[in-house]
Every structure is written in C-alpha cells, then in structure tokens.
Amino acid sequence: MNFNLNKRNYFLIPMLLSLICVLIITLSNNFPLSWDIYTHINYSLAYLHNGITSVDYLLNAPNGKTIGYPPLFHMVLILTSFVSGTKLIDAARILQVLLSLCNVFTICYVAKEFYDEKVAFFAGILLLSSFMVTRLFLPIPETLAMIFFTLSVFFYYKASTESNYKFSILTAIFAMVTLITHFSSFIYLMLLLFVLMIVQTAILRKFDAIEYYIYVILPVFLLGIVSLVVLFVVSSSHLTQLLSGIISIINNPFDLFMGQVAMGLERYVRCVGIPLIFSIVGLYFSFKKKEFLFVSLWALIAFLITNLHWFGIPVYTFRLLLYLLVPMVILGGYAISNILDNVQNEKRNMATILTIALIILSFVLCIVHINDPSVNIYSSSTEQSTYQIAPPTSEEVEVLNWFEKEDVQNKSILINNLFFGTVISSVDEIPIHYGFDVYTNKSLTKSSYNSLNEENIGYIVYDKSLILNDSDDYNYLDVQFVNGSYYPSYYFTKKITDDNFNNIKLQHTEKEFENDRFIICKVI
C-alpha cells in the first residue's frame, strides 16, 4: 500500500471519521441519545447531593428507588459536568463524543497489539461500517464498560501467551473496573474468559491458561469479599438485597442477557453488516496460517453466545452483538490485510484503490446508520400502544421549560407517563411520585388534599395522548393501569376534553398549563 501506517497514525483516520459521525448526530439533537441516560442523570444527581448512596430519592418519591447500577459511570458524568461547566444533560452529550472516540481508539490499539498497524487500521474502518457502532455512540454505562472489557480480554491474551503475571493483574484490574461500571458486562467478561481458558487448554494445549485465569479471578474474588464486608458494616439490608441478587444470578446467569425473542437472520446480518463477511474470510486465513487463533476463538465463542437461542436460551441477541463486533472487526481487519497483501504483490495501485473504496463505503454506511430512525428515536411498548420516550418532543420541551421557570419548592409531581416523568426529574431535578392511578382516584383517601400534602405532591401532569384503544366502549373518562416493558403507563378511557376533564381533575387542583398534549395542574 502506498500510504504508510506506523505506530503514530494508524488510528487517526478511523477516529477522525468516527468523530465526524458522532458530531453530526450529537449536534443535530438538542438532547443526548437514548432514554436510559435520563435514569443515569437521576442517579448522578443522587450521588451529587447525597454522596455514595443506594437510593435515588428523585424517583418514586418520597421512599426513593434503589439504584441498580455501579457508580463509576455516574462519577464520570459528574466529573465531565464539573470540568465542562455544563449541566449533567449537556455533559452526557459530551460523553457521547468522548466515549465513542475512546472505544474506537481502544479497538484499534488492541488490534495493533494482536497483530500490526495495518490490521488495526482496517479494524477501525470496519467498525464504522456496522450498524452496531451506533451503540458506541450512546452515553450509557455499557459504552464506558466496553473500553475496559476490550482491554481485559486483550491483557488476558497477553498473560496466557507470554506467561507474564503482570498481564494477569492488569486483566483483573480492568475486570474490576468493568464491574464497577456495568455489571452485565462484567458477568459476560467472566463467562468469556472462562470459556477461552477452557478452549485454550483443551484445543491449543496451553495448560498455563488455567494458572493465569486463576490469577485473574483471585483479585476479583478478594475484592468482592472486601466489598461485602464493607456493605455489611454500612447497611446490612442492602447486603441482603445484593446477596439475593447474586444467588439469583448464580442460579440463572443468563437472566442478565434475556428479555428478547431470538433475532431473525436478516436483522442479525443487517446489524452486524460487512464485518461478518470479512470475519469469515479472516477465520479462513487464521486457521490456514495457524496464527491469530486467539481472536478467531474469541469471535467464534462470542458468535455462539449471541445465538444461544439455538440451545433454548432466549438471550438478548441485539445487545450481545456489541460484544461480538469487537473480535469480528479485528478478525475482519486481519482478513483485509491479507487480501490486500496478495493484491499488492500483483497490482500495487489496485490495493490503494480498494482501500480508499472501503474507507468511503464505511463512512457512507456510518452516515446512513446514524440517520436511522431507531438510532435517533426511542420508543416504549405497552399492551395498548407504542409511543416515543426520547428525545423529548416539542410538546414535552414546553413542559420542561415550564417546570424550569416554576418555583416547585421541592414538591413532587404525579404523571401518567413515567418515562417522561423521569425526563422531567432528571432535567429539572423534580421528585416523581409513582402510583398515578391511586393518587388521582377520587374514591380513595390518597387523592385527598391532606394526603397529597403529606406526600409533598405539588403537581399532577396529564399526558392526553395515552388513550385506550377501545375507548369507544367507555361512557366516561377514567384512568386505567396498563403494563409496559419497563414502567407501567396510565391510560385514559376517553379523549380528554374541556367538557369531561373535571371527571378526573381533583377539586383541590388548579390547571396551570396546557398544550396539545399535556395538562399541568397545581395542588392548591
């Protein structure tokens, strides 16, 4: 190839193209990608105001909601907000850019260490061509954990192939950092390393792989024991909850990755994209030359894990594809490097033309991916309907702006759309009460002024768009509980109008705001 790749510039083009793509999607949206980030902003606010805690008092006020994530990501979000001098929601948009670039660099670096700079370059280019790269643009704990996850696998490879204990320690360190970032990623990492150790021992006859695996597990195990002792001293109730969760995971570890029916073959191929083709070619070269075998085994094991539904285990295939993508693009980069070496021996210019074509193709595909509606718009499904939950719509932005100007005096709100309630809570730092159907039921004492005042409920928000499909079967306006994928939603039996709104409006509330979709009533 006519251009030179060395230790200083091999990652520049993949990172530059990634930067362009992530800036396009970040600057074209006023809010961060995904709905999950609003929950994590809430958790960050809990840490910011209460220190290290296990309860977020802004959600499910006044009792609070148990924080179900390790704290590292939230600490990083707070630090980003502090350094940039921005709100947490703007800090999340900054993290979109930083985390995506860090992941691209990490994958390129690991690919270079596995083989050479040329493989690293093409791994980075292939990464951009896959739809799954959009998962690395999300400002969520898993995106941060992917950096440590990739490094953990790499250092385990170094430990088992170079017989060096220091790499085992580095593996353990990055595994523990993964643990305090994203628990599911940690469980997957431990499972992957265990399977790799078994395969290395049984197939590659590397019996010292067991020894180095033990050196990885021991520090993690000891840290876990110390953490349990500290938790027992701080809060025995939280220790009980944690132990019950650990026992549940031991009994059925794949529960962490379940929650979706098997992905169809067509969608599977579309999500992975071009790297799937080149990784198959990479497997051929790897087994033919008897080199690059660790990455080949890593890719094959990850592929089997994403398809565990073949064995009756309904894993969450889409999310697991992200863990398959890393070894797949590295293997694909290895394949392209071999192909171009063969081409270059015969037609030097052809190798350069193919390289430029691949760069352009991958960049164009990445632009197409970031403009996919599923990347920009997030929805939730209930038994009644599917509705957008992120980013906030124009009507929702009007509500956010209204609450920003309102002096809520630490009062909490009731809302029948808890997804948007979480957004309000994270953006405007307002406590959210659960149980909309209970507190707005006029026949229950919970809806009385004294009860609302005791609960510190100051506002009731009605999302008028949530209407039952069979609303014609009802003669009056009422509220009905409807199950959902994460939160329940509270639907109205009829369309809300000026004529019937008083049927559900509490007497001791006053309408303060209304737009095409929402009504806000204040408890007076």
Image (cartoon, helix red, strand yellow):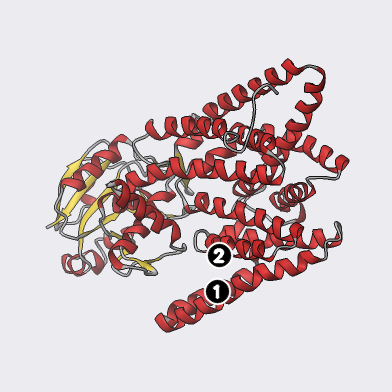
Give the residue at x 24% y 69%. 445
Disc 1 and disc 2 in contact, CB within 8 angstroms: yes
Q: Which residue is mark 1?
A: 223
Q: Is 484 located above or below residue 122 in the figure?
A: below
Residue 121 pos. (x, y %): 64, 34
Residue visible at 80% across and 59% down?
A: 200
Q: Secondary structure at mark 2?
A: helix
Q: Earlier in the sequence, mark 1 or mark 2?
A: 2
Return the x and y of residue 3 as percentages of the image width and height: 64, 24
The residue carrying pointer 1 sits among few (fewer than 14), some (14 to 19) or many (20 or more) residues within 10 Å by Cα, namely few
Q: For the C terminus, which image quadrant?
A: bottom left
Judge by depth and name the residue closer to the eye, 147 or 142: 147
Residue drawn at x 42%, y 45% is 95
One can see residue 475 in this view = no
Left or right: 243 with respect to 346? left
Q: Amino acid at mark 1?
A: Leu
Residue at 46% across, 50% down: 140
Secondary structure state at the residue bearing disc 1: helix
Residue 176: give its label: 2
Q: Residues within 10 Å of mark 2 (few under 14, many from 20)?
A: many
| Position of residue 63 in the picture relative to residue 338 (left or right) | left
Disc 2 residue type? Met
Camera-nearest residue between 376 and 522: 376
